[in-house]
Image (cartoon, rainbow, N blue to C red):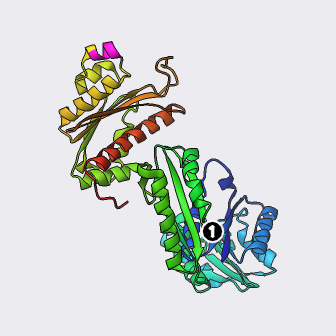
Amino acid sequence: MKAEIIAVGSELLTPDRIDTNSLFLTEELNKLGIEVLRKTIVGDNRELLAEAFRDALNRVPVVIASGGLGPTEDDLTRETVAELLGRKLHRNDEVVRAIEARFRSFKRDMPAVNLRQAMVPEGAEVLANPRGTAPGLWLEDSGRMIALLPGPPRELKPLFLEQVFPRLQRRVSGVRMFHRELRVTGLGESHVEERVRPIYTRYSDVNTTILAAPGEVQIHLRAWSDNAAQADTTLDEMVRSFELALGDRIFAHSAVSLEEVIAEILTTNRATIAAAESCTGGLLAERLTRIPGSSSYFLGGAVCYSNELKTAWADVPSELIQAKGAVSSEVAIALAQGIRRRVGSTLGVGITGIAGPSGGSQEKPVGTVHIALASSEGVKERVVHLPGDREMIRLFATQVALDMVRMHFLFNAKPRASL
């Protein structure tokens, strides 16, 4: 079964509001085996809205719309769909009473404009919305199904799950979507494509999507089938081939961040970590501590931006900085060793570099970053030349640092990999 999603509201065509409802709806429809073919955002314009619904209903049997059910003149979804289907609108007294009761619960009188929300197209089922004044509507027409849902996510999500999901569940076939996801770091999108294209092109029944994200590449595999065993076998076979092609560049087999992977690795190995950061300005510490429970493995860190504080807080010898420069492998190593020794952590990370946009030279251009990882086994150091603006360089530098931690345990402690 195929579906389309229509998000209604002129505010969604501005930079001030993002349509997140369609992401939720797509996920839930996929669970039912319903494939979303198109998503459309339409402003509060009756002609454009009618065109969007007309076109969608000509293409697919299921249309889910969000927004445009409010009490104001620019809320046009209800009227537009009724007119398109040739249905008259009638006031539903039960809906009126529900809206009045909601206002009374706030010790307020219902404004007259809210009566618009009680206008229901002929033959439509009212989907009660206890979390707002706009009820949803379920319409069927010539074998097509239309769900009109309120725009606020806190109203839409429970209303869909409680009332629309069961209705659709009764109509769907045995076809389901089967999904696998791999996350890769240390390789660009084009390099990933080169390695895996000879594999995924052999599977015409599987949709492969390669997406670039900051510091990582995501690979999504989707197969639609009514044979679960066959779909799982095919996807697992593809994953094994991708693992051979990409090796240790795969850091996760699900939708998790690299810092979440590191959190599990550190916890599993009962290891702790500390960081001495210069050009990243505490971003590595922020990523490590955004995970709940990070106090069990992150002991602390220092933002050693000035040369003086590199010496005072991480014991980097001032003569080393003078001799080698603040941006050097020697200083990165000293930062990692110094912070590890200061706080008594299992691992110490040192980062120093040039994030730009100024400060670079021919010898050390903007994007030059030295990263070191100190442990009881010794020190590993990398110099990378990162592209992008200041924020991207800082983010990529922390990604490299986290990946160095992952690789350390991959080749030393062999942690349990469950992500």
Please, what secondary structure does the residue beneath circle 1 have? loop
**Is residue 295 found inside the magenta-colored segment of the image?**
no
Left or right relative to 265: residue 384: right
Q: Position of residue 184 (x, y in %)?
A: 47, 50
Residue 89 place in picture, x, y as percent: 75, 80
Q: Amino acid at mark 1?
A: Pro
Q: Which residues are magenta?
A: 320-324
- Residue 208 location in percent, x, y? 59, 60
Where residue 172 sits: x, y (%)? 61, 83
Q: Quadrant location of the N terminus?
A: bottom right
The secondary structure that dominates the magenta segment is helix
Residue visible at 48% across and 33% down in the picture = 393
Q: Nearer the viewer, residue 268 or 128?
A: 268
Query: What residue is drawn where x is 72% and y is 74%?
Result: 60
Kindly tell me whether residue 257 is visible in this rendering: no
- In this rendered view, identify the residue nearer to me: 396 or 24: 396
Residue 265 seen by the camera? yes
Residue 348: name its quadrant: top left
Name the residue that disc number 1 marks.
Answer: 111
Q: Is residue 30 above or below residue 281?
A: below
Q: Which quadrant of the rendered structure holds the C terminus?
A: bottom left
Q: Residues within 10 Å of mark 1 (few under 14, many from 20)?
A: few
